[in-house]
Image: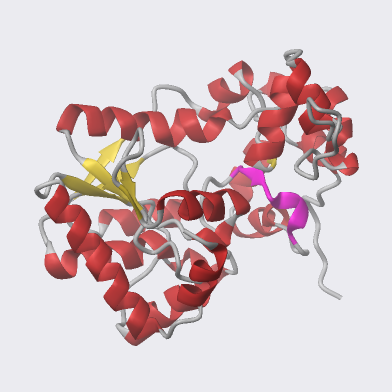
Amino acid sequence: MELWELKQKQSLPLEAKIAMTLRRIREWYEYWDGNVYVSFSGGKDSTVLLHLVRQYYPDVPAVFSDTGLEFPEIREFVKTVPNVTWIRPAMTFKKVIEKHGYPVISKEQAQWIERARRGDPQVIREKLYGIRPDGSRSRFCTSAEWRRLFNAPFKISAECCNEMKKKPLKKYAHETGRVPIIGTMASESKLREKNWLKTGCNAFEAKRPVSMPMSFWLEKDVWEYLRKYQVPYCKIYDMGYERTGCVFCMFGAHLDAEPTRFQRLQKTHPQLWRYCMKDWEAGGLGMRPVLEYIGIPYENYQRE
């Protein structure tokens, strides 16, 4: 796939995107003889995906990974959706932090920092300082701003997504023989864009086959679909939240305009906010010093 193809598809009107997405879903369903499932987070993207899938295949199960990190509104919304299987990770988020570290900045940056701290010489040279094995410069490296995280007084890792979501879903797939359909979009990150360029919407030949039939959608398409077809969605979005992933996730938090996700959390869910800010030794997640180190505002937002 080429980048221009992605841009072309992203520029299409909604109805054309719906038709293309439904074709990808049918191809995936037929290829696997119906042994598929929808990875359902309760967020708006997977809500649209499930609505599309069940137009043709109403009995396809949805699978919700109950990580314990969801907004209570998300959990309540998922309970209203029929035929949803709830699964759980083997570890709590606090155990994941204790074993691996905090999820900060982005998955790629966190992975590079974690590997560099373990002493991987190639990562230190290429990803930390941008020097390839042949001595040339690489632009795909940790920015100077975040290089200081190498010496941060706390552990950093991208393993939370793997432990909390990917592993439980892999276990479900292994036990049932079903393959996933997920609602990710290429516009969400460079990594997801890269994945689409490599495989397209349906990764039939991947090590872990996966369908991403909405890859070429944009966020505005999702909202247009929800409103046009009057699809119920979680009310958390009406509280000012743009993303509804794990409540305490710090990936991308440095890009938030004020009020940041944590300032908003203090206002809308004060009990959850107090728990994540509470000192580790006192039973909390100890996130206050992490946010301060990175420079993310987390409390007392006052609109001027």
Residue at image point 10% right, 56% down: 59
- Which residue is at the front of the view, 254 or 116? 116
* Placement of 116 over or under 170, stated as above or below: above
How is the model colour-coded? secondary structure
Residue occupying image coordinates x 78% and y 52%: 299
List x then y, in percent, for residue 51: 25, 68
304 and 40: which is toward the camera: 40
x%, y% of residue 210? 33, 45
Residue lying at the far front of the rendered structure: 134
Based on the displayed image, in which of its 4 quarters is residue 54 positioned?
A: bottom left
User: What range of the chain is rendered magenta?
Assistant: 248-256
Horizontal and vertical percent for residue 185?
47, 60
Furthest residue toward top? 119
**In-image side of 69 versus 285 (left or right):** left
Residue 154 visible to the viewer? no
Is residue 8 depicted above or below 44 in this figure?
A: below
Residue at position x 56%, y 64% in the image: 3
Q: Where is residue 121 in the image (x, y as percent from the top left)?
A: 78, 16
Q: Does the magenta stretch include residue 253?
A: yes
- How many labels sit on residues? 0
Relative vertical location of residue 78 with respect to residue 217 in this rendering, above or below = above
User: Hey, which quadrant is residue 304 in on the image?
Assistant: bottom right
Q: In this view, does 252 lie to the left or right of 75?
A: right
| Identity of the residue drawn at 90% across and 40% down | 144
Q: Is residue 225 above or below residue 184?
A: below
Q: Nearer the viewer, residue 228 or 14?
A: 14
In this rendering, does residue 202 appear at all?
yes
Relative placement, left or right, of 289 versus 193 is: right
Q: Does the magenta stretch include residue 162?
A: no
